[in-house]
Image (cartoon, helix red, strand yellow):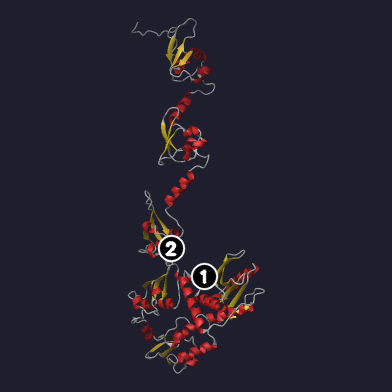
Amino acid sequence: MDDRCPWQLSGSAVMGKRRSATEVTAVRARLKTEFVSNLSSPGTALEDIPLSSTDRCQWRCSAEGCDHEWRTRLQFRTRTVNPSGCPECAKRRNRAPGPGEALADLNPALVRQFRRNLSRPDRGPDTLRPQSHDLCEWECAQGHIWPATLANRTNGRGCPDCIGHGRSPFECNVAMLVEAASGVSVELDHRLRLPGRSQDRFDLYLPEPAPGLLIDLDPEWTHNRPGSLERDTAKTAAALAAGLDVERIRSRGLPPVPVPGLIHHEAGPGVDPEDWAEAVGVVLRHRGLPWRQLTPAEVLAALTKGVQLWERAVAGPEVSAADVAPHLEAEFVANLTNPGRGPDRMPPGCNDVCVWRCGQPGCGYEWQAALHSRALGGRGCSRCASTRVGVANSRPGAGESLAEVNPAMAAELIEVVDHIGWTAFDLLPGSNKTCRWRCSDCRFEYPAPPNRRTGQSSGCPRCARQRTSTARVRPKPGRSLQDVHPALADELLEVIGESNLTAKELRPSSAKLCRWACSKPGCPGRWEATPDQRSRRGGTGKRCPVCHPPRKSRTQQ
């Protein structure tokens, strides 16, 4: 039995909408049973006080076996949201439950989402009644965490982030009643992408008869907000323009949707699922579809099915991330969002950010990533992924390998460093992988990637230095020994050690040792000297030793 006071039972009936004159009269009648006196204005009767008055009054609880008296303002007792009541009854409601009265006994499914009691940390599911107003912390199957009172959760409030995945208890109940009364299957939260719009969602969809009927339910509590009528109009107009069959059922008092050709259907006020299902029945009967009146037992069965449908909608998957991706347990290091929770305690779609360590041999890289990106997205170690991508991108296609494009360079390849077993057929000509080469001319071995060998003036570094040295000693045009000292060039026999060089390829200042022959007729003079020695002092240096014998020193004389 519900042990709330009578005024509390009526409070929820007026939440979320304006009171009518009948409802105001009913509220006064219920409060009159507990009204004792007006302390702020003595002698004033309850009928003469506005419901929003701040007058302080004396009250006596009308609950059976209570009779507790207390003082509070009238406006606190008549407000539509969380009206105050007898404090002694509130204490009794929050008392420790008796045998079989605890949340753990009555609602094990809700206990699985319980994390901790924020109002009274020492009270848990075993010592809390289902209608307790303690503020608790909850965690849904998707890993979302939020605070809510236990009474709200018991009364059907779910995770605010899941929001029933596009559904509500009201829509689930209406859908099951319509399905039972018409015999036609009903799909909840039908989604379409209409031309020029993002994805639109329709509350009910009846696929039979083809092409199907779309029905939107517009209760006042969700369609009486700023901009709601404009959004409903644009959505309905786009659906009709696309050739869809659409009907809207709106709460009584809401303005009709101004779309030409759309019939205005009403239900409510309130969100009684039987009333709204009957409005859907009017639409179906008008279209010639079957509809029958349900018996009380059939209504109860349909509503029970609707509750079960809603519970499944907000429950999420019953499997953990470890069930979906067992390899994550070996790579899991820590949960940064909720320390202590591992993959076995998190659903696959959980948003918790965790630390992971790669289990591949030789890697061990650590990184941070949300669990859902690994369990559902299939993401792994970024370092290993980069390596795999690099290897895949470096492998040549048919006719693209180094061996096929540049056989001469491929013949000098010894090995590919860090890639045992690779050959010139596994390399692209522009690869950046370090290789070892053996020069085909001087047999010198050196490391270099292929992309450095395919450029200009690249290859064996020893040969390159030799070419540079040779180029450095060659004269510029018009500056050779032949051009500057033609007489000396006529006496040049050979460059010792480099017999291929001629006077045209020597500088006058060259230090290369050469062999010379005297140009005088009949002179047998032969000597060795460098071009630099011969070109000094205007060509008189290091002359023929026969024609110009060296002078004797004074000591020799």
- As drawn, the label of residue 448 is none
Classify 10 Å Cα crowding around label 1: few (below 14), some (14-19), many (20 and above). some
Residue found 43% across the figure and 29% down from its top: 462
Q: Residue 89 placed where, x, y %?
A: 38, 86
Cβ atoms under marks 2 and 1 closer than 8 Å: no
Q: Tag 1's secondary structure?
A: loop
What numbered label is drawn on residue 348?
A: 2
Of residue 357 and residue 410, the one placed in the foreground of this image is 410
- The CA span between labels 2 and 1 is 20 Å
In the picture, residue 132 is in which quadrant?
bottom left
Q: Is residue 79 visible?
A: no
x 45%, y 32%: residue: 412
Residue at 44 percent of width and 78 percent of height: 155
Q: Is residue 346 above or below residue 409?
A: below
Pinpoint residue 449: horizontal percent, then vertical percent.
45, 38
Q: Nearer the viewer, residue 187 or 90?
A: 187
Amino acid type, residue under disc 1 in the picture: Gly
The tag on residue 166 is: 1
Mark 2 surroundings within 10 Å by alpha-carbon count, few (fewer than 14), some (14 through 19), many (20 or more): many
Give left or right: position of 392 versus 106.
Answer: right
- On the image, the x and y values in percent for residue 137 come to 39, 72
Q: Position of residue 37 (x, y in %)?
A: 43, 93
